Image: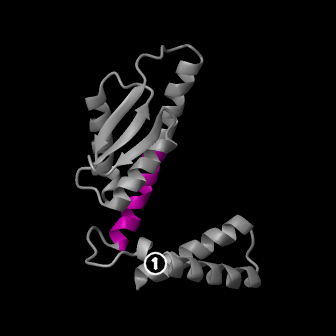
Amino acid sequence: MTRVALSLVLVAATYLLMLASADPVDAATALVVAAVTLAVFRRFLFPGGERTGPGLLSRAVAFPAFALAVLRDITLGTWHVALIVLHLRPLVAPGIVAVPFGERSRTGVLVGAFVATLSPGEFLVDVDEERRVVLLHVIDASDPDDVRRQHDRFYDRFQKKVFP
């Protein structure tokens, strides 16, 4: 029940932020929109069965470190791409790397792929559920094992605690 209530508040808050409004009528509309959205997509957002992974409090505590790690990756990726675009560093071996899912949940795979795409220099190509890999186009695929290690290390250190 707390997942639903928290989701309702977060969707409504997002709606209000998009409107840039704190008007009570807009807040009521936001709650209605959030409730309808959550009701329509309930099966997708809250699949049945036993819930696994960390609780809400431990996720909230781990989220700032996750967000800072994402910002660090975005900054480093931007710097790396800028050096290549300015011809200060050569473009060596761009290519596609298959990164295995491992123990990630469906949400964990989606969040990991989204986070990878946020950082310049990496782009999600496909999620191959049969092979259980995420295909990423990376600006430096000269060492695919290193790319996989970096993604596994990021997952283990930051993402697993928030989005397993």
Question: At which x and y percent is residue 65?
Answer: 40, 53
**Would you place residue 17 above or below residue 121 in this image?**
below
Q: Amino acid at mark 1?
A: Arg
Residue positioned 32% across, 72% down in the render:
55
CA neighbours of label 1 inside 10 A, class few (<14), some (14 to 19), many (20+): some
Question: At which x and y percent is residue 7?
Answer: 49, 76
Q: Considering the image in quadrants, where does the C terminus appear?
A: bottom left
Q: Using the rendered view, name the quadrant where residue 108 is placed.
A: bottom left
Most distant residue in the left direction: 103
Residue positioned 51% across, 82% down in the render:
39
Residue positioned 31% across, 37% down in the render:
98
Q: Which residue is mark 1?
A: 42
Say which of 66 and 51 sits in front: 51
Asked whether 58 falls inside the magenta stretch, the response is: yes
Q: Using the rendered view, name the quadrant where residue 107 is placed.
A: bottom left
Q: Which residues are magenta?
A: 56-71
> What is the secondary structure assignment of the residue under circle 1?
helix
Question: In the drawing, does residue 69 fall left or right of residue 17?
Answer: left
Question: At which x and y percent is residue 68?
Answer: 45, 49
**Would you place residue 109 above or below residue 40 in this image?**
above
Q: Is residue 72 visible?
A: no
**Would you place residue 17 above or below residue 23 in this image?**
above
Question: In the drawing, does residue 18 fall left or right of residue 92?
Answer: right
Q: Using the rendered view, name the quadrant where residue 61 is placed.
A: bottom left
| Colouring of the image | one colour
Q: Considering the image in quadrants, where does the N terminus appear?
A: bottom left
Q: Is residue 103 visible?
A: yes
Instruction: Please tell me whether the stretch drawn in magenta is mainly helix, strand or loop.
Output: helix
Count the numbered circles shown: 1
Say which of 94 and 10 sits in front: 94
Residue positioned 55% across, 73% down in the render:
10
Asked whether 2 falls inside the magenta stretch, the response is: no
